[in-house]
Amino acid sequence: MLRFCVFLFCALAPTTLDSTPASAAPAATEVRLSHISVVATGTGSPVALIPGLSTPRAVWDGVAPELAKTHRVLLVQVNGFGGDDPGANLKPGILDGIVADLHTYVSEKRLGRVQVVGHSMGGLATLMYARTHPEDVSRVMIVDALPFFSVLSDPAATVDSIRPTAQMMRTKVASAYGRPVDPAVVDANVQSLALKPASVALMRTWATAADPRVTGEALYEDLTTDLRPQLAKIGTPVTVVVPWSKNKFGEKLTVAFYQHQYDGLTNANFVGIGDAGHFVMLDQPQSFATALADFLK
């Protein structure tokens, strides 16, 4: 199960973002901050899309162009992922840095309250953002993320009990920096992250672009962050997208597990999407697009 924890968020490289503006929309613009960069496109009420561990903003390519017709879309990318320079992310504090940079961006652009969608580690950062800066956030969508990821390896895990393992994993992942990428390892890593062959093939072409030093530190922080005690303090409406597979636990048991992990949220809605793996937006693009549209209504 710990191997699954390492590879649950595969390193993905970005595809080229088409920044050609719509007829009435401003051109896409990129702003680089210490821990993240933001590409903004489209017009309308703002929606921020935050990808997961080692994942580029290109993971949202299936929904971003349509979304930009009616919204100002803020495509976030963590520095060091997608081939970007790591910037400040070679030091501890990546998750807090994501939150701080988002707050800075939203404040400086005077965007008001933003709807935020976060996948995987990006979902954890989204919860942290809603907890720390509720004045910035109108509602959030969490896409296959947990408030304490380490329960997947040990239901009784605590931050202290998982810390030695997390430290070991951080060191192992970071040690890959500067070494040639083994295609066989990449193939093994992506197989468990999606169900459809086309999704796996796409992820395979994206793999290996993330800086493993950033991945290692971000993984460590993800494993050792437990937001469950703070969930009751999050008043922002939260939608949790739960991918499920009939070949594993099915929808009922999977959704029930997530509901239990989010016990304490006062305003939560759970949306199951199957058959799908962790990268639900790749396995079931139409169902995910529908869920996103419903969320934004």
Image (spheres, rainbow, N blue to C red):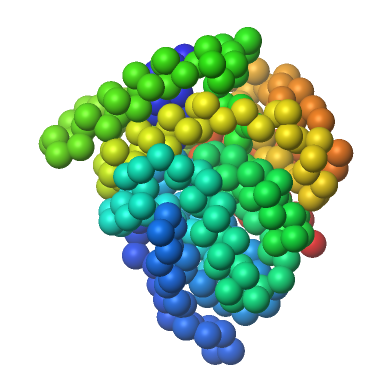
Can the viewer see residue 110 in this picture?
A: yes
- Report the side of 211 relative to 234 (left or right): left
Q: Spot the residue most to the bottom.
A: 24
Task: Residue at 59%, 13% (x, y): give it.
Answer: 157
Question: Height in image: 183 above or below 81?
Answer: above
Percent position of residue 75, x then y: 51, 62
Q: Identify whether 98 is placed above or below 233.
A: below
Name the quadrant containing residue 135: bottom right
- What's the residue at 39%, 28% (across, down)? 7
Identify the image quadrant of the C terminus. bottom right
- Inspect this view and state whether residue 255 appears: no
Q: Position of residue 229 (x, y in %)?
A: 73, 28
Q: Among all residues in the image, which is located at the extreme right?
A: 266
Residue that appears at 43% across and 29% down = 220
Residue 291 point in image, percent of width and height: 70, 50
Q: Residue at x 50, y 33 (%)?
A: 222
Query: To which quarter of the image does residue 33 belong?
Result: bottom left
Quarter of the rendering containing residue 230? top right
Q: How many marks?
A: 0
Judge whether 156 appears above or below 77 on screen.
above
Residue 284 locus on image (x, y percent): 58, 44
